[in-house]
Image: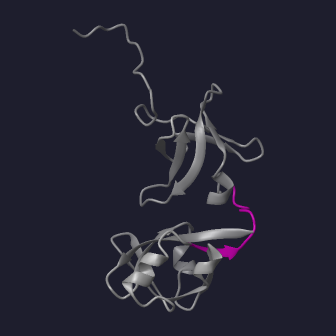
């Protein structure tokens, strides 16, 4: 099984350096000079890490095979992948395990489908495509994501008010005029 370590982002500068969206909990062990990654799509690789640096929480990578901004622009959106097994950590999931799961409230109301997981400095965000087609980003914390059930194929969420389309404030009996 192929596991995504990072997704290549925008070019940075003129000499082929790129930003990467980290998709691993251990980027300092995975993104190291000399490491060779297969890519998805496969036609973009393999890519060999030449240099890595971080600045303000963002990861920047230079690959041996990419020397210009044009070459860097051509691989934007490509994923760096490796062979791996299912996660054996409790309460830890790979992005590929979450994508495609149905998203619902504890009442069973279907809200949409998981389409991505974005790694952010504070916490990960579960990206949900709602029935309307718009996307909602729900913080992947226990308070809002109560259950992930891979076997049942769904995630139970209690997102804060305002994150989802069509939410109405609860009726309080008060009138405003």
Left of 48 or right of it: where is 165?
left
Could you tell me residue 45's position as x and y percent?
60, 83
**Residue 88 x/y as whole percent:** 73, 62
Q: What scheme was used to colour the molecule?
A: one colour
Q: Does residue 99 sit above or below 38 in this rendering?
A: above
- Quarter of the image with the N terminus is bottom right
Counting every numbered tag in the picture gives 0
Residue 84 in magenta? yes
Q: Which residues are magenta?
A: 79-90
Q: Residue furthest left?
A: 177
- Please name the residue shown 47% across and 88% down the image: 66
Judging depth in this view, the residue of 133 and 51 nearest the camera is 133
Taking the image as shown, residue 89 lies to the left or right of residue 60, namely: right
Question: To which quarter of the image does residue 168 belong?
Answer: top left
Residue 73 horizontal/vertical position (percent)? 42, 76
Which residue is located at x 65 percent, y 27 percent?
108
């Amino acid at each position: 099984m192929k596991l995504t370590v990072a997704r290549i982002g925008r070019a940075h500068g003129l000499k082929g350096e790129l930003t990467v969206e980290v998709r691993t909990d251990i980027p300092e062990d995975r993104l190291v000079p000399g490491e060779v990654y297969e890519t998805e799509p496969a036609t973009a690789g393999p890519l060999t890490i030449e240099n890595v640096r971080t600045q303000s929480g963002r990861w920047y990578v230079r690959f041996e095979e990419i020397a210009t901004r044009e070459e860097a622009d051509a691989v934007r959106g490509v994923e760096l992948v490796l062979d791996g097994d299912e996660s054996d950590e409790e309460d830890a999931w790979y992005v590929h395990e979450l994508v495609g799961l149905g998203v619902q409230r504890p009442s069973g109301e279907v809200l949409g489908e998981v389409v991505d997981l974005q790694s952010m400095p504070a916490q990960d965000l579960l990206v949900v495509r709602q029935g309307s087609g718009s996307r909602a980003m729900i913080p992947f914390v226990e308070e809002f994501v109560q259950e992930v059930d891979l076997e049942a194929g769904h995630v139970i969420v209690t997102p804060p008010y305002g994150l989802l389309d069509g939410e109405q404030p609860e009726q309080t009996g008060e009138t405003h005029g």
